[in-house]
Amino acid sequence: MMLILPDVLAAEQLAQCRHALSRAQWIDGRSTAGHMAAHAKHNQQLAADDPLAVQLGNLILDVLGVNPRFISATLPLKVLPPAFNRYEGGGNYGNHIDNAIRSLPGTAHRVRTDISATLFLTPPEEYEGGELVVEDTYGSHPVKLPAGHMVIYPGTSLHRVNPVTRGARIAAFFWVQSLVRDEIQRETLYRMDTAIQQLTREVRDSAALVQLTGVYHNLLRQWSQT
Ligand code: NI
């Protein structure tokens, strides 16, 4: 399931991020790519231990920690700290699948990349190209979102970033290990939770809704791993 989360960042949070990133120390993105991916990757990133990356990453994690749709759709067990990249002057990232396992920087903790996330930080009118293109069995899906919007998609997906031919595209990206590893089970729970939330607003006191909410939690109990 690919899902777009609008307005993850409020206007003032977005402005704070963009202002800080306008003075950031960008480094060659290939330094953080695996052997195979390094050939395909032509962009810039912030170092994982860059204090600015840590500070803005924490801001994003705080915001997502209280975002009901993000929590419902990802059912997060572990979230890697957001990283930041920048594409300009034809910069691009050719087709690849992300590494399955990533280490939490500076620790022995490892995270399985069930879900990939990209938070767009540059307004689309400020650059040409730069679409994130995610391939699945239904075809190619180009994604280019307003600044502050985020897309999540399965970590198993083949994807690329098209060349940025004008301006510069800055984004935050990170991965989530979900409590529910199976993509279809996770999507089922998301759709059920969304329906329950809507019914809760519409019908309020309902014995059937209590039952249905119980079924959601019992499925989550069956399917989750901690
Ligand atoms: Ni990738």
Image: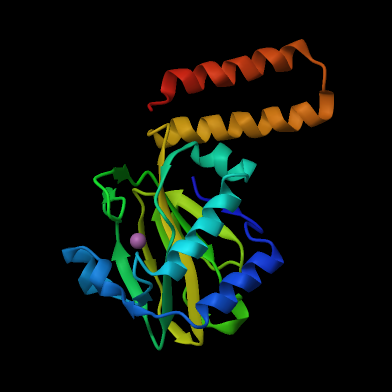
In this rendering, would 97 be left or right of 154? left
| Number of disc labels | 0
In this rendering, would 60 be left or right of 54? right
The location of residue 51, given as percent across then percent down, is: 42, 68
Residue at image location 31% in from the left, 50% down from the top: 104
Q: Is residue 142 visible?
A: no
For this orientation, the residue located farthest to the front is 51
The location of residue 67, given as percent across then percent down, is: 62, 46
Instruction: Identify whether 94 is placed above or below 186.
Output: below
Task: Write down the quadrant of residue 213 in the picture.
Answer: top right
Q: Nearer the viewer, residue 67 or 35?
A: 67
Task: Write down the quadrant of residue 32 in the picture.
Answer: bottom left
Instruction: Identify whether 222 is placed above or below 113.
Output: above
Q: Nearer the viewer, residue 168 or 226?
A: 226
Residue at image location 35% in from the left, 65% down from the top: 49
Q: Quadrant of the C terminus?
A: top left
Task: Write down the quadrant of residue 139 in the picture.
Answer: bottom left
User: What's the coloring here?
Assistant: rainbow
The location of residue 219, given as percent across then percent down, is: 50, 19
Residue at image location 56% in from the left, 70% down from the top: 121
Q: Nearer the viewer, residue 49 or 115?
A: 49
Q: Is residue 212 visible?
A: yes
The location of residue 112, given as percent across then percent down, is: 31, 43
In this rendering, would 202 be left or right of 72? right
Residue at image location 44% in from the left, 34% down from the top: 184
Instruction: Identify whether 55 is placed above or below 77.
Output: below
Q: If the picture is divided into quarters, which one holds ligand 1? A: bottom left
